[in-house]
Amino acid sequence: MTEVLGLIDSSRGLLSSSKDWDMEESSSVSPQDDDDDDDDDDEEKLNVCPVREETFGILRKDKSRNHQEITRTAVLRATATTCMETEGFTMPKPLNIKTLAEACGKMKYEDHFEKAIRVICYYNVKRDVLSDPEYHFNNEKFKMGKKLITDGINKITGQVMSQSFDDARETLGKILHTLQDFYSHSNWIEMGNTSPYNDLINPDEELMNIADELQETCEEDCVKKTCTASFKADIINNKILTSGYFGSKKPAGKCSHGGALDLSTGFGKSWNGINKDSRDSSHGSLHKTAAVVAIEASVKLLENIRDKINNPNNFLRLVGLHEKNPKGSLKALLFSPYKDRYPDASEGAEFDD
C-alpha cells in the first residue's frame, strides 16, 4: 500500500514514492483504525496531486517550515492553552503529541490526536490544488482571502455545534492554508511586522492601506535581475499592503510571486518574486520570520474558534483528544512516513537547527 502513497514534486514533476521518505517514525494510525471511513478515501487522497509550488511548501526543504509543520505546531500550542484549565495541568517540555495528551489527562486518545492533526494537514495541503489567487492571497486579493477565512470560522463553529467534527476538520485545514500563505505571499513581513495581522480573522475590521489596482509596487529592472522582486520605496515607506502575482497575467509594475512555475517572471527575466515560502526563495532570508508569524496567526485563529465554540471539550474533540475516533485513516496515512523534524512545538523552538 505504501508503494503508491506519494506526492507530486512540483519542482521536478516526479512522483515521490514513500520509499524515498524517512521511515524512522512509523505511523501510529493504521487504515483499520476507523470503521467509519468510506470507500472514497483512497480516490480523494490521490486527488491532492498535483500540488503547486506557490505556498509555504508541502515538500520539505532544508531549514524551512512547510504547511504541515506550521499547522501541527499551531494545533499543539492551541490545545495546550485549552488544557490549562484542567486541574493539575503542567505545560510539557518538549511539547508534542505524546507529552500533551498525557498532560491533558487524555493519554488513551493519543492516536486519535495524531490522526486528527494529520487529517487537518491533509486538507491544508489539498487547498494548494486550487489556483484561484484568493486561496493564497496572491494577486492582491486580500479582501476575498479574508472573506474565505472569516466565513470558514463561522462555518466551523456551526459544524461543531451540529456535531459535524469531520467536516469541521476539513474546513479548518483549508482556511489555515490561506491564512498561512498571507505571511509568505504578501509584504507584511517586509514592512517590519513581527506579529500577526489580527484583522484577517476579525470580520468587523477592514483591511487597511491595500495597494491600488493601478499602483506600481515593484521595480522591473531586468538588466540588474531584480525584476518583480524589489519593492518600490513608497510601498515600504508608506506601509502599503501588496502581494505577488502568480501566473502569466501580471499587470506591469506589480510584484511577482516568483519561482520556477511562476510564468509572471518568465524567460529573460530573473525568476525572482517576493514569496518567502522557503529559505531558498528570492526573499528567503525572511522565511523564518514569516513562518514564526504564520504559526502565531494559526494559534490565534484556533483560539478564536475555541472561544466561539465556548466549549473546551468540543474543541478538544475537534483536534482529536476525544474518545470518538476521527474519520480519515487514509488521509492521515498520507503523511505517516514523515519523521517529525521539529519534535518540540514549544514557543521559541521553531527553528532549533
Image (spheres, rainbow, N blue to C red):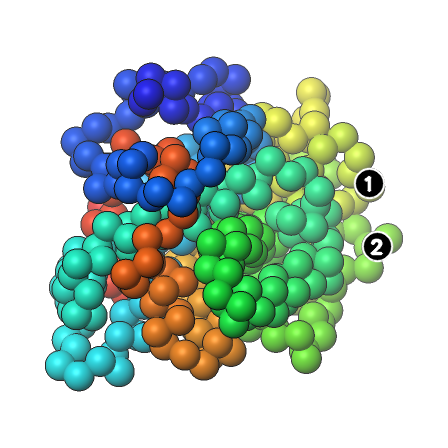
From the viewer's side, name the closer residue of 67 and 7. 7
Q: Quadrant of the N terminus?
A: top left
Q: Is residue 32 left or right of residue 179?
A: left
Report the residue at 21% width, 55% height from top: 110
**Does 238 sit above or below residue 230?**
below
Q: Residue furthest front?
A: 35
Q: Is residue 249 above or below residue 294?
A: above
Q: Is residue 188 visible?
A: yes
Query: Image quarter for residue 18?
Result: top left
Residue 252 in which image quadrant: top right
**To which residue does mark 1 refer?**
252
Q: Is residue 241 left or right of residue 74?
A: right
Who's the residue at 52% across and 55% down the image?
167
Secondary structure beneath dot 2 equals loop
Residue 215 in the image: state x and y as whole percent. 82, 55
Which residue lies most toward the right here? 214
- Residue 104 pos. (x, y %): 20, 70
Residue 5: % across, % down: 38, 24
Q: Which mark is residue 80?
A: none
Residue sitting nearer the eye, 262 or 39:
39
190 to the left or right of 67:
right
- What's under tag 1, amino acid-wise? Ala
C-alpha distance separating marks 1 and 2: 11 Å
Instruction: Give the camera-side residue of 136 and 125.
Output: 125
- Residue type for callout 2: Glu
- Residue 213 marker: 2
Q: Position of residue 210 (x, y in %)?
A: 74, 64
Task: Name the element at disc 1.
Answer: loop
In front: 335, or 144? 335
Q: Residue at x 39, y 19 (%)?
A: 4
Residue for point 35% across, 74% down: 313
Q: Residues within 10 Å of mark 2 (few under 14, many from 20)?
A: few
